[in-house]
Amino acid sequence: MGHDGRLATRISRMGTESAFEVLARARKLESEGRRIIHLEIGEPDFDTPRHIVEAAAEALREGFTHYVAAPGLPEVREAVGGFFERTGRGLFPAERVVITPGAKPIMFYAIMALCEEGDEVLYPDPGFPMYESITSFAGATPVPVPLREENQFRMDPGEVESLVTERTRLLVLNSPHNPCGSALTHEDVEALAALAIEHDLYVLSDEVYFAIRYGGEHASIASIDGMHDRTVLLDGCSKTFAMTGWRLGFAALPPDLVEPFTRLIINSVSCTAAFSQRAVLAAVTGPWEPIEAMIEEFSKRRDVIVEGLNRIEGFSCQEPAGAFYVFPSVKTLGVPSQRVADFLLNEAGVACLSGTAFGPKGEGYLRFSYANSIEAIREALDAIETSLPDLPR
C-alpha cells in the first residue's frame, strides 16, 4: 500500500463506522472465551422473509446473471416507484428510480453530483457518520445541525435556518433516526420543506428506517408540495426487510439527477446484481406480515430496554419513536461516554457505542441497538447494573 505520504489527501478526510470497530473488539474478546452481549450493530436479527429468498434463487435459475441497465431493471424501478406511492412518500415514475448495491452509494452519488468544493452540507449531529465523512471526502464543508434531547432529538427547523448560508447546497435528513431513534413530525418536515424551497436547497432524505415506527405515521419530506423535484429519497432493503447482507438500496431522484446518478453508477459498480434486483421486486410487492411481526417484536424489546435503562442509576433514556436504537444519557456519571462504552465492553461484557461515534454532540450518551432477544437485553441490563459501581470516576 505504501506509506501515508503517497496516499491522496482526500483519504485522510474519510471517516469510518465505529460499530464495526467495536464488533471486531467484541469478537476478539469472544475468541478469548468471554461472553459478550451484542448491542452495538445496527442490523435486524431476523431472517430475510422466505418469499424474498426464493425470488432470488428463482432468478438465478432463470438466468439473471448478466449485466443489466445501470439504473436497474425496468420492472424493479417501476415497483419501487409504486412502493414509494403506497407508503405515502410521493408518486415517482420508474425513470426517476435507481437501484444500487446498498444505500450508501446513494449518499455518495448525491453529494458527489451536487456539491462543489466549498459548498456546505447540513447534516444531523449526532447522526450516521457517513454524512460527514462523504461530504469531507468530496471536498465540501460539513455543517452539523445539533439534535437536542430537550427536542426529542428532532431536527429544529429554526436552528437549521440559522445555519444556512449562501454556500449551503444540501440538507440531510434521517427519520426515523440513527442513533437517537427520533422521528420527524409532519409539522417538522413541512417547516423544513419551506426552508429548502426558500433557500433553493436539495434534500437527501434518508428513510431506511421508515417502516420501523411505534405509533404515528411516517412523515416524508418528499411528499410535501414543492419537494418532489428537489428531494433525493433514499431507502433500501437492509432494515425493513432484514437484508443487510444483500446490499440493496434504491432511491427516487429529482429529474436533473437521474443522468448524473446513472453515470456515477456506470463508473463505480456498472450495475446492481440482476438476480438480487428480483429480490427487491419480491420485497416491495410481497406480503407485509413478516415486517409487521418484526416491528411488533422490536416494540416489545424497546419497552424492556427503556424501562431497564431508566432503572439504572446514572442512566436516563427517552422512548424512541422509531428504528431499533436507544440513546440514553450517561452525563450524570461524570465520565466521558467513550470510557463508559469501553468499560461496559471490557467489564460487563456488553458491546455498545459511545455517542461520540455519531458526532461531537453525542458526548454524554450511549447507543444501544435492541436488535437482540429480550433475554439477551435483560442479561445485558443486569450486567450493566452490576458492574457500574466499579466504573472508575
Image: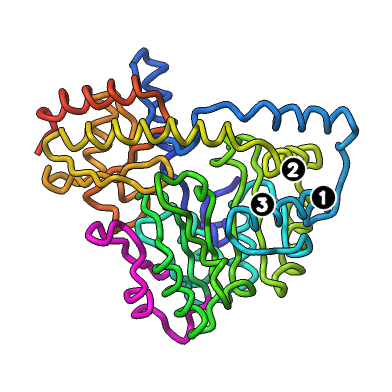
Q: Please name the amino acid that badge 1 sits on.
A: Glu
Q: Is residue 138 or residue 82 the one in the foreground?
A: 82
- The reply to whether the C-beta atoms of the residues labelled 1 and 2 are less than 8 Å apart is yes
Residue farthest top in this picture: 33
Numbered tag placed on residue 139 in the rendering: none
Numbered tag placed on residue 83 in the rendering: 3
Q: Is residue 386 left or right of residue 204?
A: left
The first of marks 3 and 2 along the sequence is 3
User: What secondary structure is marked by label 1?
Assistant: helix
Residue 316 in view (yes/no): yes
Q: Which residue is mark 1?
A: 75
The first of marks 1 and 2 along the sequence is 1
Residue farthest right in this picture: 63
Residue 107 in view (yes/no): no
Residue at image coords 39%, 30%: 25
The percent coordinates of residue 254 (x first, y second) are 67, 71
Q: Which residue is mark 2?
A: 281
- The reply to whether the C-beta atoms of the residues labelled 3 and 2 are less than 8 Å apart is no
Start and end of the magenta stretch?
142-169
User: What secondary structure is marked by label 3?
Assistant: helix
